[in-house]
Image: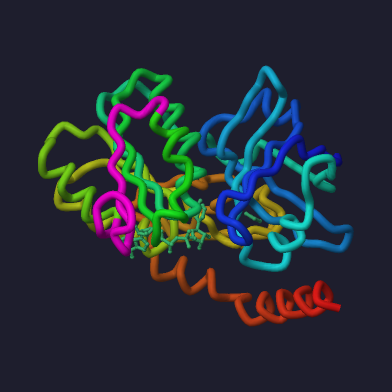
């Protein structure tokens, strides 16, 4: 069903945008951790994006995306007043949230947006939420203001030191875990090497660690097997068994290999669309 875009904001010009979409049927049911599948062109692929926020009163959902392939390039051509051709959701299992004390939510780059909805859910449940957010540079750091509205602590880093502490999110995480032995849970969303590094960091502290995986998806409903990952030696489908899993049990090497599967074809597609745009 076509879903109208209410507003668009370029968070990082030419690279990352935020869309608020009128989708009351999704907004009524969406929980932290859920994602949507989008299709933006008639002959286009379906692709997943994690829901960054929901306003059930207004009937809207918010998504934030990094322009990286053909479909997100086409999505970036749309603006307020246009419609998303197909929007299906909410999909995936929602985040398991209970009142448990201190929860550290780690977000890297674009992953900060997906982490935002999860962190908000933990804050609503009465948990003390510590946000650790990191980006390459100050101008790539997303949603700091929005997170600060409900997070008890905000720890910020940039790779180049242009804002916050100079370093990566795991530097801040190890410091925070060393200071406080009573952290109930760590949740991490971002690039796969970051989530792997977070899981490696929390292991010696024996802290429960949840990661939100971004496998390649086709149907998003458990039928095609494209999104399969190995967790604790078992095959799981990210779309219906996840997207969140115990970070200490995920086979990250396999995930990284599988994410490379269509890289050449994706590059050809991106080049074709760029040529068309230039003509
Ligand atoms: P990036 O590569 O710029 O990294 C952002 C921050 O993450 C860095 O500044 C650093 O603090 C941290 N980081 C990165 N690699 C790390 C490592 N090896 N160890 C410790 N910390 C590390 O991020 P980006 O370019 O915005 O990321 C885009 C990627 O994130 C895409 O591949 C996208 O698919 C993925 N993503 C995943 C989800 C998800 O649901 N898991 C959501 C959005 C985006
Ligand atoms: Fe097809 Fe998950 S995307 S099974």
For the question of whether residue 236 can be seen, the reply is yes
Residue 102 as seen in the image, left or right of residue 4? left
Residue, x 28% and y 49% (percent of image)? Answer: 164
Q: Nearer the viewer, residue 199 or 73?
A: 73
| Residue 37 placement (x, y as % from top left) | 70, 48
Q: Nearer the viewer, residue 214 or 136?
A: 136
Residue 53 as seen in the image, left or right of residue 59? left
On the rendered image, what quadrant is the C terminus found in? bottom right
For the question of whether residue 95 can be seen, the reply is no
Residue 154 magenta-drawn?
A: yes
The segment highlighted magenta reads: 149-168
Residue, x 63% and y 37% (percent of image)? Answer: 62
On the rendered image, what quadrant is the N terminus found in? top right
Res 267 → quadrant? bottom right
Q: How is the image coloured?
A: rainbow
| Residue 84 placement (x, y as % from top left) | 80, 46
Ligand 2's image quarter is bottom right
Q: Nearer the viewer, residue 101 or 149?
A: 149
Q: Is residue 43 above or below residue 265?
A: above
Residue 65 as seen in the image, left or right of residue 245? right
| Residue 41 placement (x, y as % from top left) | 84, 58
* Magenta span main SS: loop
Residue, x 46% and y 66% (percent of image)? Answer: 255
Residue 80 magenta-drawn?
A: no
Which residue ends up furthest to the front in the rendered image? 162
């Amino acid at each position: 069903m076509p879903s109208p875009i209410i507003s668009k904001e370029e968070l990082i010009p030419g690279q990352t945008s935020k869309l608020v979409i009128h989708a009351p049927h999704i907004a009524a049911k969406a929980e932290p951790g859920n994602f949507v599948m989008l299709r933006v062109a008639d002959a286009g692929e379906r692709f997943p994006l994690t829901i960054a926020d929901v306003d059930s009163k207004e009937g809207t959902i918010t998504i934030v995306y990094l322009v990286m392939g053909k479909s997100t390039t086409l999505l970036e051509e749309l603006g307020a007043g246009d419609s998303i051709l197909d929007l299906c959701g909410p999909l995936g299992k929602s985040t398991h949230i209970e009142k448990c004390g201190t929860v550290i939510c780690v977000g890297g780059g674009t992953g900060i947006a997906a982490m935002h909805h999860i962190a908000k859910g933990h804050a609503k449940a009465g948990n003390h939420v510590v946000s650790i957010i990191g980006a390459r540079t100050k101008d790539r750091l997303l949603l700091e203001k929005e997170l600060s509205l409900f997070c008890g602590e905000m720890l910020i880093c940039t790779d180049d030191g242009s804002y916050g502490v100079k370093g990566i999110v795991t530097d801040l995480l190890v410091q925070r875990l060393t200071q406080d032995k009573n952290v109930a849970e760590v949740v991490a969303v971002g690039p796969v090497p970051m989530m792997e590094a977070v899981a490696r960091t929390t292991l010696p502290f024996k802290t429960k660690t949840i990661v939100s995986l971004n496998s390649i998806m086709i149907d998003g409903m458990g039928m095609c097997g494209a999104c399969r990952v190995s967790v604790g030696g078992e095959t799981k489908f990210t779309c219906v068994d996840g997207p969140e899993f115990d970070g200490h049990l995920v086979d990250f090497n396999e995930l990284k290999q599988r994410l490379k599967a269509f890289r050449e074809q994706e590059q050809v597609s991106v080049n074709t669309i760029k040529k068309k745009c230039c003509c």
